[in-house]
Amino acid sequence: MANKDNGGHMSEEREQIPQRATFSEALKKTWQETKETFGGVIRAPRALWGLNFADVIVQGLAYFGLLTILGKFLSENVALSDLHAGWIYSFLTGGFTFAMLFLGGVCDRIGVRKALAISILLIAAGFLVLSLSSTLNMDTGLMSPTFYTVLIAIFIMVIGNGMLQPTMYAGVKQFTNEKTSAVGYAMIYGLMNLGAFLAGLISPLVRRSSETTFPPNGIPGVLWVYTALTIVTLVVVMFILTKRTVEKSTLTQISETKEERDAKAAIPKMLTVIMALAAIASFAIYMATKNPLWYVPTGAFALMAIWDFLRKRPDHPFRDSKFTFFIFILIPVQTLFAHQWLTIPYYIDRAFAGTTIGNNFEFFSNINPILIFFLCPMVAVMTSRANVYRMMIVGTLVMALPTFFLAIGPNPAMLLAYIVLMTVGEAMWQPRFLQFAAQIAPKGKTGVYMGVAQFPWFLTKVITGLYSGWFLAKYCPKPELGLALNTETMWFIYGLIALISPLALMLAKKWIGQEMHERATATCTCSEERC
């Protein structure tokens, strides 16, 4: 789960394996890479210690910990419906990705140290406001003071997180060189997953011990802990990342390349922005009035924005129909990523209410990150010579099919089987996705292709949040409502949605598979054709 907004970073050593590894060799390789990651943490320059500390606490523990409990908080503490809670999720997670498009260059202008301080300060302020929202005993419900306070808190966090992640990666680039950068990026990726797993351990303990102080569920107590941890992180990071430390630890000077200038030049111009804002406004009016006629201006303005954006960019990736199909057809299976926080915590809390699993829903919702931490290098080693397009088909299929285990009904064994197998599928295709996008990009356009490849993930988070709350209210309602659960239907539908991706990739194999494979291998710099 934690790796969705960060991609998969594969070491040079892993890419030079001459033949398909056996399971025992993969285990050995995984253990070696795990030791390398933690060894890299220990031997890292002082400046990287600051980045890693912020990574574990802010990006891992606090952010993904918040995603796990936010739904329950909005439902029980803010008194929102499941539908409206899903919209809030979309605002947070989609806004996070969208904000990166505009704030990613802040660290280039003011430096990593200042950008890191500002971003963590904003996130801490957001957590503080969010904690106060349910501590001040204000009125709750839609359009209530508590509701608006929560929106303000999340908006502040969106800005902070949108600045933080690009700053983290810019910091790794600045504080490493060609020989150490792979380990540096792997540390950021691995430690964030570790932090997400730690949230699953800490949250239920704090929540249960805080129920008396912060009724009805103790979640405000968890939020206060996250607030305190984020503030402590800010102090620690500023203590570690002094100006002198930054100067001494800088191994790579960060400066704009031609590709980066080209990417900045591709920012939408005024007419595109106006059309996009008009589309958003039209959709907002539709949501408020429920008048279907507003679909017409929404669609018209959206199409005009897209047309204006692409007509001035003949070499834009979106004008590559096969590449565009490839990245957008992955949206159905990517919805399962979004359900990791939009649905799974609710499902475990409600369908397993009163059981050990239900009482520790945060832990069971965050098994995925620790599995990814170990499975990604293992699967990468075992499939290093596999055709990437074929791996995309198999991986998305392996990820989608276990969803039907949950369609059998609430069962601990089926839940664990789903989590494990879904994670195996994720480890098979998710790292290969960005690798593939980078390999098929024309010379000088890798950065643009990588950025565009993330756009469907932004759409996935927004779209899934719009309907997930309705499904929860209908098929997995709150236990206190006394309504019957029908989670089998919900997961069956979600399974069918996820299956669209592997099936479409299979059907399109003759159309795009061979050509895209040839484009990937043509740009592959490896000694053997194994891409």
Image (cartoon, rainbow, N blue to C red):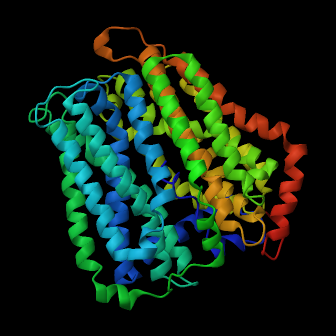
Could you tell me how many numbered marks the image carries?
A: 0
Q: Quadrant of the C terminus?
A: bottom right
The image shows residue 12 at horizontal and vertical percentages of 65, 75
Residue 403 can be seen in this image: yes
The reply, left or right, for residue 15 in relation to residue 255 is right
Q: Which one is nearer the viewer's eye here, 65 or 35?
A: 65
Residue 454 lies, with reference to residue 293, above or below; the image says below
The reply, left or right, for residue 369 in relation to residue 355 is right
For the point 53% across and 33% down, the residue is 464
For the point 32% across and 86% down, the residue is 245
For the point 51% across and 41% down, the residue is 277
Q: Which one is nearer the viewer's eye here, 316 or 64?
A: 316
- Specify the quadrant of the image occupied by residue 268: bottom right
Residue 399 can be seen in this image: no
Residue 355 lies, with reference to residue 428, above or below; the image says above
The image shows residue 195 at horizontal and vertical percentages of 37, 56
The image shows residue 444 at horizontal and vertical percentages of 73, 72
The image shows residue 332 at horizontal and vertical percentages of 64, 35
Residue 110 lies, with reference to residue 470, above or below; the image says below
For the point 9% across and 32% down, the residue is 212
Q: Which one is nearer the viewer's eye here, 172 or 479?
A: 172
The reply, left or right, for residue 510 in relation to residue 187 is right
Q: Which one is nearer the viewer's eye here, 356 or 323?
A: 323
